[in-house]
Amino acid sequence: MTSTPTRKRVLSGMRPTGKLHLGNYVGALQNWVRMQDEYQCFFEVADWHALTTDYADPSRVKENSMDVVLDWLAAGLDPKKSVIFIQSHVPAHAELHLLFSMITPLGWLERVPTYKEQRENIKDKDLGTYGFLGYPLLQAADILIYRADCVPVGEDQVAHVELTREVARRFNGFYGTANPVLPEPRSLLTPAAKLPGTDGRKMSKSYGNTILLTDPEAVVRQKLKTMVTDPARVRRSDPGNPDVCPVGDLHKLFSSKETMAKVYEGCRSAGIGCIECKSWAADGLVQILNPIRERRQKFEENPRLAWDILEDGSRRASAAAAETMKDVRTAMGMSLELK
Ligand code: TRP
Ligand code: SF4
């Protein structure tokens, strides 16, 4: 491992939603790839978290987890720098979650904003389960079992990290010595890049408007062709404004300064057409996506490669988790030794 003990520790995770899209990339993954050089990173596929909503049919969880891992590796997560693993391969998370469940007041969990929201919004599944309520506590165990200093997350997960801090404080308060057993992590808020999907709404699997990291170049170009533009540009002769155009948002993320200048000038003066402008956006995009897709292909051709990485990852994660669990049990007076 290239990391040294003095590096701060990072843990983050994703639910196994299957193949990742550009929104997952700019909203999280790209940032994780960069963090690998500065921090000692742990990245987990939170497959038990998927069960909190998909318990009635878990048949795709494993396949979806592998899809996520392949996209991670393809995008540049590097097992030489980071520990990459699947949550259920490190059962100690479940032990810590159980211990936390003893000390966590129900009200803390009922107050978590995503709990109320999802209970109201998801009507096709019965989320009145013990596991769904406890899901942020499982996340707290994910984080605290590695004694992570920082947790890179989007806005929607900040409340979960806040709960994690409260749980750590309560644990340390009950069982702590001078040194806190579980240090309180902080969230590192990933700046939310504006990434519209092909219909102009936020890119999201549930809207069916995504561009996947695995989409072949021809598909990326085709999706761009159908992308909505500045609604004020009805005719080719109407001037437009890249700042209110979803294609303009893509340019800001993926195009060079020179291309951007051509886009602003050409769009505002009606000097270029949207079709041309979209093909430039596609050029920028495929430059990022082509190498990712090619790397992914290598892993797809040799599934053993990714599996070996995961086995090594769960070994290293388990070793780090075991250290914490030893201290946790000792702090509670329940060590596995005779005395
Ligand atoms: N709950 C996170 C999500 O839905 C995924 C996740 C699980 C996570 N465990 C984590 C994120 C630990 C950060 C840290 O996106
Ligand atoms: Fe959008 Fe480009 Fe068309 Fe302007 S020229 S409206 S930025 S697609």
Image (cartoon, rainbow, N blue to C red):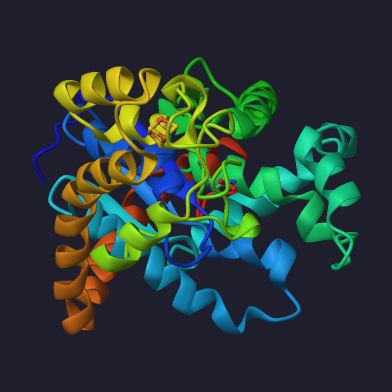
User: In the drawing, does residue 175 fall left or right of residue 63?
Assistant: right
Task: Name which residue lies at 48% across and 67% down.
Answer: 18
Task: Name which residue lies at 15% across and 64% down.
Answer: 295
User: In the drawing, does residue 226 fall left or right of residue 256?
Assistant: right
* Total labels drawn: 0
Tell me the quarter of the picture where residue 305 sits: bottom left
**Quarter containing ligand 2?**
top left
Please provide percent x and percent y for residue 11.
Answer: 40, 39
The residue closer to the viewer here, 178 or 63, is: 63
The residue closer to the viewer here, 266 or 116, is: 266
The residue closer to the viewer here, 321 or 263, is: 263
The reply to whether residue 111 is visible in this rendering is: yes
The reply to whether residue 302 is visible in this rendering is: no
Please tell me whether residue 244 is drawn above or below residue 88 in the rendered image: above
Please provide percent x and percent y for residue 203.
Answer: 54, 46
Task: Name which residue lies at 90% across and 48% down.
Answer: 120
Tell me the quarter of the picture where residue 159 sits: top right
Please provide percent x and percent y for residue 141.
Answer: 57, 45
Please provide percent x and percent y for residue 72.
Answer: 30, 56
User: In the drawing, does residue 16 fall left or right of residue 161?
Assistant: left
- Single out the residue that lies furthest toward the front: 237
